[in-house]
């Protein structure tokens, strides 16, 4: 009978640990609260004539005084390309995998406005610390450590404000190990609604179980999923929150007035 009680107690402890995993975070990184007070333009301030993640979109955001959210991939030759998708098919019209090509080859295929693919060093040179950056790291499944190492190296010495985020906890673990001084955030949403991944991956991602080990400084969550249980637990624990990608101006202002960070698209504040 005693072993049954022990098993029940262990099961209860494990359940509570999983339930409260979203509440695990590293408290009081000085940049997070500061940058919650700055609206971030999703992939730069883009529209039909100004492509997402282009230098033109980044310059527009700088001129308007918005923070800039953008995405990074590691190229075959170890460069950091500013691109959301893992392929150039949607934005440049040619199906080349970013991680499988050297930067020079990728830059031969311009964005819709004729600009070449931006790189992280070029973005930093253009922004020059005038507005903060929210940088999402996207790896190809095997290069998380290399992507983080390249990003950290380029950002060393940059005098502007920036924070880093990723959907993949492996990126956060790499950041925790390689650059613990940099603010890191867990991107998430209600993965139980997503159909593109197997259930055994969706469940831990939805529950943010690995927050126990990665200890993010903030959580960036899809606004439409705001009522999901893990996010409610994180809110109650006081985890700093950013919401993505907010396309309704009223909703964006409401979240902003509540003290949350906002990543917006399709309008200006």
Image (tube, rainbow, N blue to C red):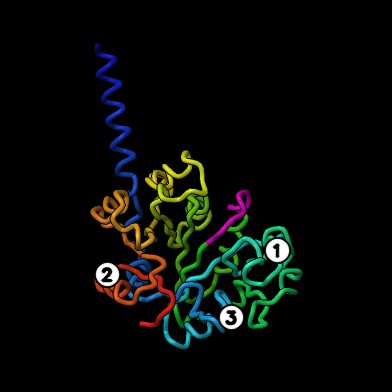
Tell me what residue is drawn at x 47 percent, y 88 percent.
Answer: 63
Query: Which is in the foreground here, disc 2 or disc 1?
Result: 1
Tell me what residue is drawn at x 36 percent, y 70 percent.
Answer: 262
Among the two numbered marks 3 and 1 on one chain, the one whose residue lies closer to the N terminus? 3
Element at badge 3?
A: helix
Query: In the image, 90: left or right of 66?
Result: right
**Image disc number at residue 202:** none
Among the two numbered marks 2 and 1 on one chain, the one whose residue lies closer to the N terminus? 1
Element at badge 1?
A: loop
Among the two numbered marks 2 and 3 on one chain, the one whose residue lies closer to the N terminus? 3
Question: On the image, numbered disc 1 is attached to which residue?
Answer: 95
Count residues near mark 2 (Cα–Cα under 10 Å), then give few for <14, some for 14-19, many for 20+: some
Identify whether 119 is placed above or below 167. below
Tell me what residue is drawn at x 24 percent, y 19 percent.
Answer: 5
Marks 3 & 1, CB-CB < 8 Å contact: no
CA gap, disc 2 to disc 1?
41 Å
Pick the residue in front: 11 or 115.
Answer: 115
**Image disc number at residue 259:** 2
In the rendered image, which quarter contains the C terminus? Answer: bottom left
Residue 59: % across, % down: 53, 84
């Amino acid at each position: 009978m005693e072993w049954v009680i022990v098993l029940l107690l262990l099961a209860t402890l494990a359940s509570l640990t999983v339930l409260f995993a979203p509440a695990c975070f590293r408290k009081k990184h000085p940049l997070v609260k500061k940058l919650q007070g700055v609206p971030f333009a999703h992939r730069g301030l883009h529209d039909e004539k100004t492509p997402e993640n282009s230098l033109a979109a980044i310059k527009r955001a700088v001129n308007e005084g918005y923070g800039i959210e953008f995405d990074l991939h590691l190229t075959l030759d170890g460069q950091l390309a500013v691109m959301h998708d893992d392929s150039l098919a949607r934005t440049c019209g040619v199906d080349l995998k970013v991680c499988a090509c050297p930067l020079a080859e990728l830059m031969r295929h311009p964005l819709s406005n004729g600009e070449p693919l931006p790189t992280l060093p070029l973005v930093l040179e253009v922004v020059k610390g005038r507005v903060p950056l929210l940088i999402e790291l996207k790896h190809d499944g095997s290069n998380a450590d290399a992507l983080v190492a390249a990003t950290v190296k380029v950002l060393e010495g940059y005098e502007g404000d920036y924070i880093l985020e990723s959907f993949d906890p492996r990126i956060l673990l790499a950041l925790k190990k390689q650059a613990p001084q940099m603010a890191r955030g867990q991107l998430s949403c209600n993965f139980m609604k997503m159909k593109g991944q197997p259930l055994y991956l969706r469940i831990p991602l939805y529950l943010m179980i690995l927050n126990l080990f990665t200890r993010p400084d903030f959580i960036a969550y899809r606004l439409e999923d705001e009522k999901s249980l893990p996010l409610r637990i994180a809110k109650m624990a006081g985890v700093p929150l950013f919401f993505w990608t907010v396309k309704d101006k009223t909703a964006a202002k409401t979240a902003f007035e509540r003290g949350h960070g906002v990543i917006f698209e399709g309008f200006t504040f």
